[in-house]
Image: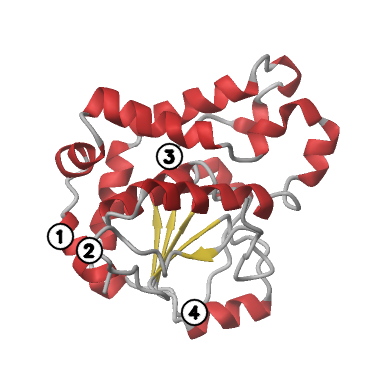
Amino acid sequence: MKKCKSLISGAHNMRDLGGFENRFGKKVKSDMIFRSDDLTAITMEDLDYLSRIPLRTVIDFRSIPEIDHAIDHLPQTVSKYIKLSIDLGNVSEIDLTKIENPDILMMQMYAEIVRKAQEQFKSFFKFLIEKTNTPILYHCTAGKDRTGIATALFLSALMVDKSDIIEDYMQSADCLKKKFGDIVKRYPELESLFTVKEEYLLEAFKVIDNEYDGIENYLVNHLDVNVLALREIYTF
């Protein structure tokens, strides 16, 4: 498992997607697109860093109650803040003591995101395809599930190898130890809800393969992704 390398101190799970090499030998450009957890607790130094990128667009996958509970702090360089809420229900109202198998719950959630968040992902890729929106940062609360699937879809569209996609995804396990450490101490049997496991992302890929005839068909025919344009913008 790769060690955590969050780019800012006030977010635990922010990283640049640049540097991945795809099957054609091209690399994903750096300083163009970032994944993260929420930007609620970022510092003045963090804001200065994001301004120097300079960050222009933030896409927020959190539900409206999540957003209202923890408002993002954004640098002045951000001209577009876009809410593409993937609402998984009010997690804060779940009785944690009554969850029998958290791993099954997580795998079911990943499958449902693939099936039910297609409109949000369509919009996500439409914003990505507009060069004037870059550099872009997208996130949810933890930056691991909704953001994890969005990242897997994005890197798949760029033809990055699945093993590299999984390696990036798994980095969140280390990044989020501090963010969720206290709650995991209280409910150690529910640690699965606050981390990532390879089988969760593989469940999303399995649904895509079995129900949507593979990742390329899912991207092109269900999410309307212009993969050639996307590769032109984000790889070199």
* Mark positioned earlier in the residue sequence (3 or 4): 4
Which residue bears the numbered disc 3?
Answer: 86
* Mark positioned earlier in the residue sequence (1 or 3): 3
Label 3 and label 4: CA atoms lie apart by: 26 Å
Label 1 and label 3: CA atoms lie apart by: 26 Å
Which amino acid does the dot numbered 3 rest on? Ile
At 23% from the left edge and 56% from the top edge, which residue is drawn?
A: 126
Please tell me how crowded label 1 is: few (under 14), some (14-19), or many (20+) other residues with Cα within 10 Å: few
Label 2 and label 1: CA atoms lie apart by: 5 Å
Label 1 and label 4: CA atoms lie apart by: 32 Å
Which secondary structure lies at badge 3? loop
* Mark positioned earlier in the residue sequence (2 or 3): 3
Which amino acid does the dot numbered 1 rest on? Leu
| Mark closer to the observer (3, 4) | 3
Which amino acid does the dot numbered 4 rest on? Gln
In this rendering, is residue 33 above or below 157?
A: below
Q: How is the image coloured?
A: secondary structure
Please tell me how crowded label 4 is: few (under 14), some (14-19), or many (20+) other residues with Cα within 10 Å: few
| The disc label shown at residue 228, or none | 1
| The disc label shown at residue 231, or none | 2
| Mark closer to the observer (1, 3) | 1
Q: In which quarter of the image is the C terminus?
A: bottom left
Cβ atoms under marks 3 and 4 closer than 8 Å: no
* Mark positioned earlier in the residue sequence (2 or 4): 4
Please tell me how crowded label 2 is: few (under 14), some (14-19), or many (20+) other residues with Cα within 10 Å: many
Which residue bears the numbered disc 4?
Answer: 76
Cβ atoms under marks 2 and 4 closer than 8 Å: no
Is residue 183 in view from this perspective? yes
Cβ atoms under marks 2 and 1 closer than 8 Å: yes
Label 2 and label 3: CA atoms lie apart by: 25 Å
Which amino acid does the dot numbered 2 rest on? Arg
Please identify the quarter of the rendering in which residue 49 is found: bottom right
